[in-house]
Image (cartoon, rainbow, N blue to C red):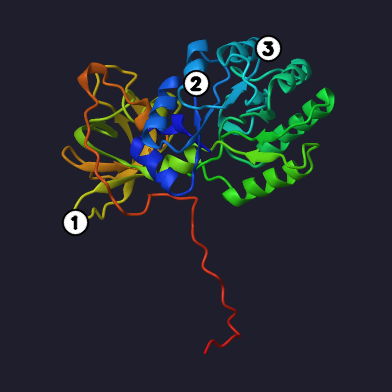
C-alpha cells in the first residue's frame, strides 16, 4: 500500500492506482476523504495509531474503512466504540521497534512496548476479525537488517501472546537514493523481509503487507528554482525551508541539483549552500550542493528527488509558496529502479 503522507498529490495517487497500487495508508480523515474522492475503488487502511473517535466513525461508516492500527488498549476501546462493536475489522497492533538503521527515527512516538504487547495482542485478537502486527523501522532505512531485526521482535511477540496472526505489515522506511545516501538495491530488502516472514509462526494464509511512501514517490518530481542573488558560496533562491526544501533545511538532507542553462556551463562544480526567500535565518539549506562555479543571479536550478515530502511540507509562510506544475516525461535525476537487460553469453551466436 502507498503511504499517502509522503505525497498527497491527487495526480500521483491516481497514477499509482492505475498501475496496480490498490491499498492506501491514510493517517487522517482528510487523507481518507482525499483518496476516497480521487480513486473510489481504493482500499483504505487507517494506520495512524492515535485517531479521533469521530474520524474513526466517519472512516468506517462513510468511507468503508475496515483496517485500523493501534498501539494501546485505549485506542482499541475507541475503535470498538466508534464502529459500534463491528465484527468485520482488521486491526493491526503496532510494535515499537528500533530505528537505529534509519536516517530518521520513528521509534519514540508510536508502538506498544515489548512488555505490554502480550495483553494488547490478546485483547485485539478478541475484537478483530483479522489480527495484524505492524511496525515502522524509521524513514530511509539504509540496510535490510532493519527489517530482519524488527521481524525478530514480531516473532517474540507472537510466541509470547500465543495468538493467531493474519497480517504482518512491515510498514515503511524503504529508501531512495540521494547524494551521500546510496542504499543497497531494493531487491535485498524484499529478500530479507520474505525470508523473515516465511519463518514466522503465523496463520498459513497470513498476508504480508508493506507501506512504502518515499520509495514510491521520491522520483516523482523535481523543483525548479531561480537564483535571486549570489553572495560568495551562498545562493539566494525562491524556495526554501518553508517550501519544498524542509528536509534540506531542518535535517540537512542533500538533494541532486543541476544548473539549467543553455549552452551548458563547462566550469568545474563548486559546493554551494542555499538561502530561501523568507525573512527567517532558519531558511537556510547548508548542503553542500554541487553546481558549476559560475552560477549567478537569474540562473535556474533543478533540485531533484523532491517527490517525497517536498510538496507535502510546503507552506505559504511570509507570502511565498506559489508555484506552477509542469508535466515532464524525462527520467528522474537519480533512481533505484533500473531495468536490467538480459545478458547474452558471448559464446552464443543468435541467428
Label 3 – label 1 distance at C-alpha: 63 Å
Eye-nearest disc, 2 or 3: 2
Crowd around label 1: few <14 · some 14–19 · many ≥20 (10 Å): few
Residue 178 in view in this figure: no
Eye-nearest disc, 3 or 1: 3
Judge from the rendering whether residue 123 lies leftward or rightward of residue 45; answer left or right: right
The residue that disc 2 covers is 61
Eye-nearest disc, 1 or 2: 2
The residue that disc 1 covers is 263
Judge from the rendering whether residue 47 lies leftward or rightward of residue 170; answer left or right: left
Judge from the rendering whether residue 229 lies leftward or rightward of residue 48; answer left or right: left
Crowd around label 2: few <14 · some 14–19 · many ≥20 (10 Å): few
Q: Is residue 158 above or below residue 109?
A: below
The residue that disc 3 covers is 73
Q: Earlier in the sequence, mark 2 or mark 3?
A: 2
- Residues at circles 1 and 2 in contact by the CB criterion of under 8 Å: no
Residue 28 in view in this figure: yes
Q: Is residue 47 above or below residue 180?
A: above
The answer to which quarter of the image holds residue 275 is: top left
What is the x, y in percent for residue 154? 74, 30
Label 2 – label 3 distance at C-alpha: 22 Å
Secondary structure of the residue carrying numbered label 1: loop
Q: Residue at x 73, y 46 (%)?
A: 195
> Nearest the camera: 284 or 175?
175
Amino acid at each position: 500500500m502507498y503511504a499517502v503522507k509522503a505525497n498527497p498529490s491527487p495526480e500521483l495517487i491516481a497514477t499509482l492506482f492505475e498501475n496496480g497500487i490498490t491499498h492506501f495508508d491514510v493517517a487522517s480523515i482528510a487523507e481518507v476523504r482525499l483518496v476516497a474522492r480521487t480513486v473510489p475503488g481504493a482500499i483504505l487502511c487507517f494506520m495512524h495509531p492515535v485517531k479521533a473517535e469521530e474520524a474513526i466513525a466517519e472512516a468506517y461508516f462513510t468511507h468503508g474503512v475496515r483496517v485500523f492500527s493501534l498501539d494501546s488498549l485505549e485506542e482499541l476501546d475507541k475503535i470498538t466504540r466508534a464502529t459500534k462493536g463491528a465484527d468485520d475489522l482488521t486491526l493491526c497492533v503496532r510494535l515499537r521497534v528500533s530505528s537505529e538503521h534509519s536516517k530518521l527515527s520513528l521509534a519514540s512516538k508510536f508502538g506498544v512496548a515489548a512488555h505490554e504487547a502480550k495483553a494488547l495482542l490478546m485483547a485485539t485478537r478478541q475484537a478483530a476479525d483479522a489480527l495484524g502486527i505492524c511496525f515502522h523501522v524509521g524513514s530511509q532505512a539504509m540496510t535490510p537488517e532493519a527489517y530482519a531485526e524488527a521481524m525478530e521482535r514480531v516473532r517474540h511477540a507472537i510466541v509470547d501472546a500465543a495468538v493467531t496472526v493474519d497480517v504482518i505489515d512491515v510498514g515503511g522506511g524503504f529508501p531512495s537514493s540521494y547524494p551521500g545516501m546510496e542504499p543497497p538495491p531494493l531487491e535485498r530488502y524484499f529478500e530479507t523481509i520474505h525470508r523473515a516472514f516465511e519463518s514466522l509462526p503465523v496463520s498459513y494464509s497470513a498476508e504480508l503487507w508493506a507501506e512504502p511512501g518515499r520509495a514510491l514517490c521520491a522520483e516523482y518530481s523535481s523543483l525548479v528554482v531561480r537564483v535571486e542573488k549570489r553572495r560568495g558560496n551562498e545562493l539566494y533562491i525562491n524556495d526554501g525551508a518553508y517550501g519544498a526544501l524542509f528536509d534540506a533545511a531542518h535535517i540537512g538532507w542533500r538533494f541532486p541539483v543541476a544548473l539549467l542553462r543553455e549552452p551548458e556551463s563547462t566550469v568545474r562544480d563548486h559546493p554551494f549552500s542555499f538561502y530561501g526567500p523568507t525573512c527567517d535565518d532558519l531558511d537556510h539549506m547548508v548542503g553542500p550542493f554541487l553546481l558549476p562555479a559560475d552560477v549567478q543571479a537569474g540562473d535556474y536550478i533543478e533540485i531533484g528527488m523532491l517527490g517525497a515530502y517536498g510538496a507535502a511540507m510546503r507552506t505559504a509562510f511570509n507570502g511565498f509558496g506559489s508555484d506552477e506544475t509542469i508535466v515532464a516525461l524525462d527520467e528522474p535525476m537519480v533512481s533505484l529502479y533500473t531495468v536490467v537487460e538480459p545478458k547474452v553469453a558471448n559464446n552464443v551466436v543468435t541467428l
